[in-house]
Image (cartoon, rainbow, N blue to C red):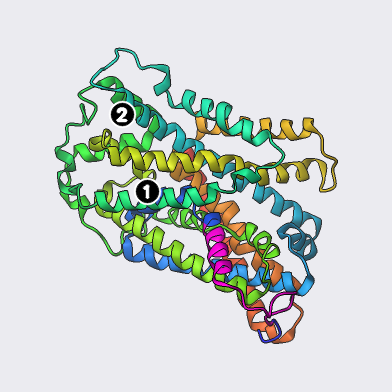
Amino acid sequence: MGVYTEGALPGGTEKPPLKFWVLQIFNLMNVILGSGILAMPYVMATVGYGTFMVSLAAVSCLGLFAIDNLTILCEKYGISSYEALAEKALGLPGKMYTIACIYFHTLIAMVSYMIIVKGELPEVLIALAKGGICPENPPIWTNGNFVFIMVLIVFVIPLSVLKRLDFLGFTSGIAMILMGIFSVVIACYSFIVDCETIGDVNIDGMNNASCTTFEEITAENAGHEYSKFQDAVSQNNTDICDLKIVNDLTKFKAITAFPIILFAMMCQESVLTIYDELKYQSRDHLMRIAKISFLMIFVIYSTVAFFGYKTWGGYTISEVLIMYTINFADSPWIILARVCSLTCVILSTPLLHFPNRRALLILVFGEKHEFSWAKWIGSMIFSFTIVVILVGWFAKSLGQMFTYAGIVTANSLMLILPALFYYKLEEDEEQATRKNVSLAVAIFGVLFLIVNLILQVGQDTGML
């Protein structure tokens, strides 16, 4: 470790001002913090709050270890691209696998964003437009598929066509503020909602003024998980509200809950870009930024997870906000929380599409292809068509998307590849221990991928 010192690149020996630290911590937190926060209460309810805290801490440490490995190699070889490191360490096949992982990871993230729009935006529109009326037939604007496709056409696609989105840079600040408001609302409602009396709510009427039309819309848009939530609540089982330190980890859903944490803590593919743009460039500076960012994300995730779990207990499903429809659909604060999350995901989707399109173009045309509008627009249409198909017909729940992304792409980009890069490229014999640890992490990641993928596919196909 001693050979990698501060100041390997220009600017490393200068003392950065406070503004530098605040901005860079803010930037990295914004990269990490995404739709995965909505599933944190579900993960805690699945494994217990003690197991959740240990798992989140372990994933945070592994994430920091991966960032440290990447930064060491970046300083040693003067490489500031994740894909370039992959090519140097694993050759062209490794580079193509890395780019494919980036493509599918960003694609699944966009799918998760549109699932949130599909489930939450109709609830906001219903709450704002209801006014005591109960239509015999559901209006078209309450159909989740219609709503999210219109959001794509009206907002996302026009922004995604542009060659640059520099003017949307301010949205990272807005997103952090909105997610802060969202977290406060979730925490406050844990003192308002009594888990043991949820079963006393009239499921047939919920909070929609006994309007079965709106109730059916909610169930259709939110998917099978909300139907399970309604069934569980109707059974009025008060034992399900007990908060558990360690839940039954032998259940299938406990095993597949851990990939969701991996997905929620992903940032490694963006870290080298952040490092390359640092005014005060050094491994020590980046690791200090990463440690503080991960600590703050740990606090945010733990807070939302605990208060969401405290509110709903064992009833908790993978999309935390949809549960409030059962008795708080018209609450101004729940509407505000929904608007906050919707604003974040709608503005973030065009930003997320840029690395997605770049990865697809490299996979199809190579890294040195010439720009053309046909390629630019065609690749966008291709990716968003897949998003529409997955969200409209195949995605069963938000948790399912997070699980697959965590098992394959996040696992590869966070655990397997950075560890393999270091093991292959580090030649210093004094770093033998770190190389062995990296190899162990890579092997663990591969086993984790194989076992969890088999279990998840088996569950989804009914074979298990």
Q: Secondary structure at mark 1?
A: helix
Q: What quarter of the picture does the C terminus occupy?
A: top left
Do the residues bearing badges 1 and 2 touch, measured as CB atoms within 8 Å? no
Residue 271 on image: x %, y %? 63, 62
Residue 8 on image: x %, y %? 73, 78
Which residue position holds label 1? 182
Tell me if mark 1 has few (under 14), some (14-19) or many (20+) residues whose alpha carbon lies within 10 angstroms of its own: many
Q: What quarter of the picture does the N terminus occupy?
A: bottom right
Looking at the image, can residue 451 be seen?
A: no
Residue 60 on image: x %, y %? 49, 66
Mark number displayed over residue 127: 2
Tell me if mark 2 has few (under 14), some (14-19) or many (20+) residues whose alpha carbon lies within 10 angstroms of its own: many
State the residue at coordinates (78%, 32%).
Answer: 373
Assess whether residue 365 is covered by the magenta stretch. no
* Vertical relation: 261 (above or below) 349: below
Q: In this orientation, which residue lies closer to the viewer: 82 or 54?
A: 82
216 left or right, relative to 400: left
Type of amino acid at the residue the image marks with label 2: Ala
Q: Which residues are magenta?
A: 5-29
Q: Secondary structure at mark 2?
A: helix
Q: Which label's residue is closer to the chain start, 1 or 2? A: 2
* Vertical relation: 307 (above or below) 54: above
Residue 420 on image: x %, y %? 68, 67
Tell me the CA gap for discs 1 and 2: 18 Å
337 left or right, relative to 87: left
